[in-house]
Image (cartoon, helix red, strand yellow):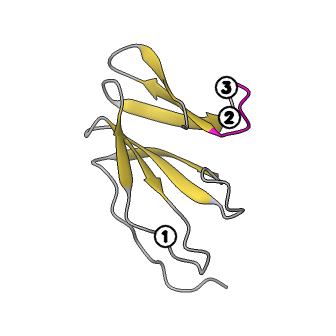
């Protein structure tokens, strides 16, 4: 029913994944919270079933969960990160 799995590198201990078009090209991209490396990975969709290598963004301590929504009403998706050990929520605004 499915093809063989393809894997992509992320940061250490990926905890949460969101799928959304972050760069407005009408292709779903992957966002990953990396618990141990204190980063969020963004993997952009090539449009052919594959993804580019990750771009990472720093977060608070031990990001546990991610959500994607336009928080500042600029019609661009922003990333919200729950940071477990720093007891914070981080917002990465898309520029």
Q: What main secondary structure does the magenta stretch of the protein show?
A: loop
How far across and how far down the image is residue 83, in percent? 41, 24
Q: Is residue 57 above or below residue 92?
A: below
Residue 82 covered by magenta stretch:
no
Residue at the disc numbered 3: 71
Mark 3–mark 1 CB contact (< 8 Å): no
In the image, taking residue 49 as reference, residue 8 lies left or right, namely left
Q: Residue at x 26, y 38 (%)?
A: 36
Q: Which mark is residue 69?
A: 2
Q: Is residue 3 above or below residue 35?
A: below
Label 2 neighbourhood size at 10 Å, few (<14), some (14-19), many (20+)?
some
Residue at the disc numbered 1: 51
Callout count: 3
Along the polypeptide, which appears first: circle 3 or circle 1? 1
User: Marks 2/3: CA distance?
Assistant: 6 Å
Q: Residue at x 65, y 60 (%)?
A: 28
Instruction: Tell me where the magenta segment starts and ends, as one range.
Output: 72-77
User: Marks 1/2: CA distance?
Assistant: 21 Å
Q: From the image, which quarter does the N terminus lie in? A: bottom right
How far across and how far down the image is residue 91, in percent? 51, 25
Label 1 neighbourhood size at 10 Å, few (<14), some (14-19), many (20+)?
some
Mark 2–mark 3 CB contact (< 8 Å): yes
Secondary structure, mark 1, is loop
């Amino acid at each position: 029913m499915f093809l063989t799995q393809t894997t992509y590198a992320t940061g250490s201990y990926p905890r949460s994944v969101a799928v959304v078009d972050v760069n407005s090209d009408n292709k779903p991209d992957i966002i990953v919270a990396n618990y141990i490396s204190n980063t969020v990975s963004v993997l952009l969709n090539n449009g052919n079933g594959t993804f580019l290598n990750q771009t990472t963004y720093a977060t608070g301590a031990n990001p546990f969960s991610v959500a994607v929504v336009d928080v500042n009403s600029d019609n661009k998706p922003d990333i919200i990160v729950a940071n477990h050990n720093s007891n914070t929520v981080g917002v990465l605004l898309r520029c």
